[in-house]
Image (tube, grey):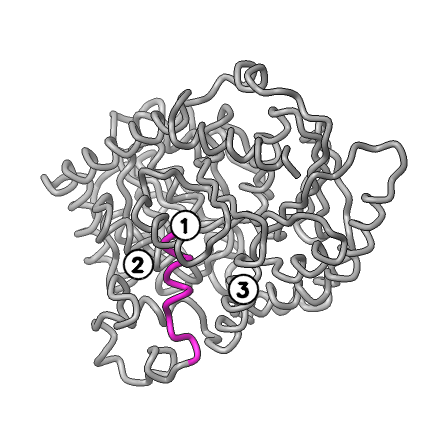
Amino acid sequence: MMLNMETLGSVSTLQSRRIILFPLPFQGHINPMLQLANILHTRGFKITIIHAEYNSPNPSNYPHLTFKPIKDHLSKVAHEYPTNRDGTYFVRYLNKSCVDTFTDCLAGLLAEPGEERVACVITDACFYVTQAVADDMKLPRIVLRTSSLGCNLAYEALPFYSKTGSFYLTKQDRFEESVPEYPLLKFKDIAKITINPQGMGDLATNMLNQMKASSGIIWNTFKELEESDLETLSRDIPVPSFTLGPFHKYFPASSSSLIEQDRTILSWLDKQPPKSVVYASFGSVAQINESEFQEVAHGLANIGLPFLWVVRPGMVVGSEWLESLPENFLERMGDRGRIVKWSPQQEVLAHPATGCFWTHNGWNSTLESICEGVPMICSPCLADQPINARYVSDVWKIGVLLEDGFERVGIKMAIKRVMMDKEGEEMRERVSSLKEKVNLSLAEGGSSCRSLNNLVDYISSF
């Protein structure tokens, strides 16, 4: 359900206050922060976004917002990214490299003559150093957590430093066992979260501690999806929490994508039967090797259904784009399969031809699939993705997890379960029910609508 922005703006008292936002410069973090900026702007706040140079947003796409770039020095280490798969390294680096430039920029904004008073700063939770900066400037800091509530609880519980926590396991004979501290997950899930347990432990500890020190937390989720986790988290982190998501549903399908979208696929989708297409996309960060890539290709080919496959340039290690496809793959598939570099994902998922979403389970993608009532096939890669995938498959039961990675027989079986079997019909019924709950939560009087009103009142009280 898309909200009427004119109505939304008219029911609130316009604020003569500024809010300063600071996103982490990665696609899955920039998108929800810009969506939040737009939501708050419709409620009358003036928005200034401090942003790193890396993955800089295009200000011309947001003429109603003010952008202030700062030096991030990430270019010194960005060249390591193709070989250094430790995501925590780059987040921890940014916390060190941006703190001085962020401090200077924020101080300058606060000192600007003739401008509205700044009500608060909203930063990505992963920018944990900003809490001390905000405290020094006596400015309330609210954090945006771009992952699920369940992910946050898992990060609190998992023994990142402990040799019993699976990170130090060398034998795979325990990989199918549940993790005692968080039984939803298996040891093999934990092994995917990070290749650097010490770094992950440092990041999680710093992030969680500074979330507890903040003035509040904004979540891109809705209460009905994670209600029990919200109750647990409210006890663990006793600061105000606002579940006003899914953010992208406040507006017509739009994009803050850093990669150009191929919109020609929408006319191809128009020609496909309802709920017949397998849509496969593994996000903006994940990489797979050549063997895995070929298994995906064979899995899609062998099921005999039409498919739309997003292959981001550089996604396959050692390849520019499609060089590693099986011989004559495109010719054999003909018009049954389409491969593109990037897609308008929200529109693809909303299209009546889309039957399932084969995803890496980044939180934005997971939410988008739920919002359109599309069941999932889960191939998580890193960070919060294995946690999200377990919720999809084992808690909400709206998808299938590829337990053994990319293997053509398992891929074919998973697609069949979701697209052809009675089990898939039941998944579709459950995810369709969640879609209805999303729409109710965003409607007047719904949980997300109330949470947004509470957030606006809270910020206005500073």
Residue 295 tag number: 2
Identity of the residue drawn at 46% across and 57% down: 286
Q: Which element type, helix, strand or loop, lies under badge 3? A: helix
Q: Earlier in the sequence, mark 3 or mark 2?
A: 3
Q: Quadrant of the C terminus?
A: top right
The 10 Å Cα crowd at callout 3, few under 14, some 14 to 19, many 20 or more, is few
- The correct choice, above or below, for 453 with respect to 204 in the image is above
Residue farthest to the right, as pictured = 113
| Magenta residues (range) | 148-161
Q: Earlier in the sequence, mark 3 or mark 1?
A: 1
Main SS category, magenta section? helix
Q: Seen in the image, is 286 located left or right of residue 371?
A: right
Q: Seen in the image, is 359 located left or right of residue 315?
A: left
Alpha carbon distance from label 3 to label 2: 42 Å
Identify the amino acid type marked 1: Ser
Question: Residue 163, how many percent across, how many down?
Answer: 37, 84
Identity of the residue drawn at 51% across and 25% down: 251
Q: Quadrant of the N terminus?
A: top left
Q: Earlier in the sequence, mark 1 or mark 2?
A: 1
Identify the amino acid type marked 2: Glu
- The correct choice, above or below, for 65 with respect to 157 in the image is above
Q: Which element type, helix, strand or loop, lies under badge 1? A: loop
Task: Say which residue label 3 marks.
Answer: 209
- The correct choice, above or below, for 389 with respect to 347 in the image is below
Question: Residue 71, how many percent across, how many down?
Answer: 78, 56
Number of the front mark, 1 or 2: 1
Identity of the residue drawn at 20% across and 57% down: 410
